[in-house]
Amino acid sequence: MLVRAVRADAAAMVRLLLEAGHNHAATDADGDTALHEAAAAGAAAAAVELLAAAGVPLDGAAGAAAPTPAHGGRAFLDAPRHDGRTAVMVAAAAGATHVVDVLVRGGADLRARTREGETALLVAVEAAHAPTVARLLAAEAGLASAVTEGGDSALVVAVRGGDAEVVAALLSAVPAAGAAARAAAPSAAARRRRRQRQRRRGVPVDGGNKEAGAAEGEA
């Protein structure tokens, strides 16, 4: 009953059920709590009610420093489900930016990782949810330095995904990364010019060819 009200984002109903004794921290067979359900459904108002029941205060200002929840509230806020994702990761995957905002304001651990090395930011980048990426970076710009288990940065994942808004959000959060990307462009152009000169001279341009490598070194 509580989960149904949460999915519908019926805040008043959620509050009544909680006051009637329904357990906000109860889990299903997959380890999902009502907060995970709210995150997946984009139910921000329901998430506020659930956090209140857990004793998690909100800072009241999006983007401001979040409070540190009490021990019990922290356990509920950052509880992982069966796949290791916390509520903020679930919301990030769904592009539920309003729920992400509520969880950030409640002090969610944005650096938590799943067994596969996922973070909330990496999940949002992978799913190409630009507003969610921007909200997470507004909370902590340093999140952009996260790397996947394979060693790819969030920026590399974003470029591979091809979403310009996500790439722009990451570049604005990490000026150094943007400068490095811009600095790499002339080098790429220089390599193209060298290859063109090699073609005019009749030198093979295959990157694996020793003659080509030698010619590039001479150029």
Image: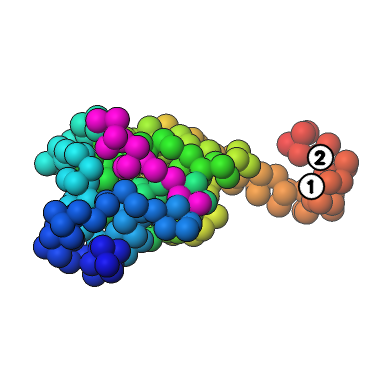
Mark 2 residue element:
helix
Residue 98 drawn above or below residue 114: below
- Which residues, given as a range, are shown in magenta? 70-82
Q: Residue at x 55, y 55 (%)?
A: 160
- Residue indicated by mark 1: 207
Tell me the kind of residue under disc 1: Gly
Residue 139 drawn above or below residue 71: below
Q: Does residue 20 appear to the left or right of 180 in the view shown?
A: left
Mark 1 residue element:
loop
Q: Residue at x 31, y 42 (%)?
A: 77
Q: Does residue 98 appear to the left or right of 152 in the view shown?
A: left
Q: Nearer the viewer, residue 67 or 134?
A: 67
Q: Does residue 68 appear to the left or right of 207 in the view shown?
A: left
Q: Are marks 1 and 2 in contact (CB under 8 Å)?
A: yes
Residue furthest front in the image: 21
Report if residue 101 is visible in the image.
no
Q: Residues within 10 Å of mark 2 (few under 14, many from 20)?
A: some
Q: Magenta stretch: residue 8 in it?
A: no
- Residue indicated by mark 2: 213
Report if residue 128 is visible in the image.
yes
Quadrant (top left, top right, bottom left, bottom right) of the C terminus? top right
In terms of sequence position, does the residue under pointer 1 or pointer 2 come before the other? 1
